[in-house]
Structure formats: C-alpha cells, structure tokens
Image (tube, rainbow, N blue to C red):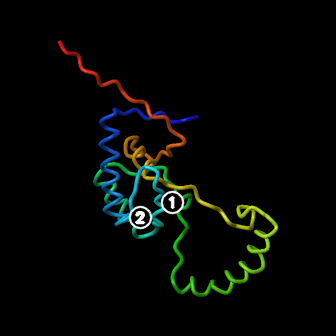
Amino acid sequence: MKKEVYTSFSELRRTSEQMLRLVQRTLAGNVEINLRTSINYDLGILGLDWDIFLEEYEVTFKAQLHGLIYTDYFDEEVPPLKDILLIPIRIFWLLLVYIPARLVGINKNRIFWYKEQPPLTVGDLVLSAIAGQFVKREKAEIKIKNTSRNNS
C-alpha cells in the first residue's frame, strides 16, 4: 500500500528547489544533480558527509528523516587499518569466489553476503521533507491539494 503525501504544487516546487540547492552545496560540489540523482551511488556519499547533510536538512526543513535506516542505503565505513587488513581476504574472495561465479553466470546478489543497497535519491529526500518522515518515492503517492482562490 502506498503512503499518500498531500502537498500543493507550489510547496512541491519550493521544496524541490531548496533540496537541490542543499544537496548541491553540501554533497554534490561540481556534479550536476536532479531529482533522480542517487546520494549513495551517483554521489558516493556516506559517513561524515551524510552527517553534515542531515544537520543542514534538519535546519532547512525543520524535520528529521524518521524511518530512514542508514544501513539499508549505505555501507558501514571501515576504519583505515581494518580496511588494509582486509585486503588479502578481498583478493582471496575475488579470485576464488566472485570471478568464477560471474563467469558461470551466477547473479552477484546470490554470492554469499553481497547485498546491493537501493538508491537513495534527491527525490526521496524532497518527498520526505514534505511528509515529515522518510518516504521512498516508489512507495508513495503525491496528492496535489487544490489551492484555487475564489475571486469574489
């Protein structure tokens, strides 16, 4: 069942413009972005950059992303020393498991623990700012409120 999010066209446009400016300023730098830009894939954001963005998000939209589970969209950061120590294991896994599995056509999602996170898009963040909690665009339906004025 899709969550219904009610908004006016002007609020949707204003929130979209604010979110694009916020993401551009805090996360994207010189990369061109739009509502389909993925925070975790296209921009490669995680950790401290995401924390800084969340602080700005809360101030700008006076809302929090309640319901967003960080690990559903972002890999956990590995400390540098641990990352270096994992190199031999990653090479072993690559040579003995991943490459042979791909050569015989096994889907990468079925190889051990590999889990590809879904994209977290700028559009998801716009909709979440309007809803006041985290909402994926695919799981929501935007309902435009009638804001016509009576000319009496």
Observer-side mark, 2 or 1, equals 2
Depth check: give the residue in front, 102 or 48.
102
Number of labelled discs?
2
Residue most extreme to the left: 152
The residue that label 1 is drawn on is 70
Image quarter in which the N terminus is found: top right
The residue that label 2 is drawn on is 50
Name which residue lies at 71% across and 61% down.
109
Name which residue lies at 51% across and 60% down.
70
The answer to whether 94 is drawn above or below residue 134 in the figure is below
Crowding near the residue tagged with mark 1, few <14, some 14–19, many ≥20 C-alpha atoms within 10 Å: few
Q: Residue 105's x, y, as percent?
A: 79, 64
Sequence-earlier tag: 2 or 1: 2
Assess whether mark 1 and mark 2 are in contact (beta carbons under 8 angstroms).
yes
User: Helix, strand or loop at disc 1?
Assistant: helix
The answer to whether 69 is drawn above or below residue 92 in the figure is above
Q: Which amino acid lies under the numbered mark 2 shown in the image of this protein? A: Trp
Q: Distance between the residues labelled 2 and 1?
A: 10 Å
Q: In which quarter of the image is residue 86?
A: bottom right
Name which residue lies at 31% across and 59% down.
56
Q: Which amino acid lies under the numbered mark 1 shown in the image of this protein? A: Tyr
User: Helix, strand or loop at disc 2?
Assistant: helix
Position of residue 59 in the picture relative to residue 4 (left or right): left
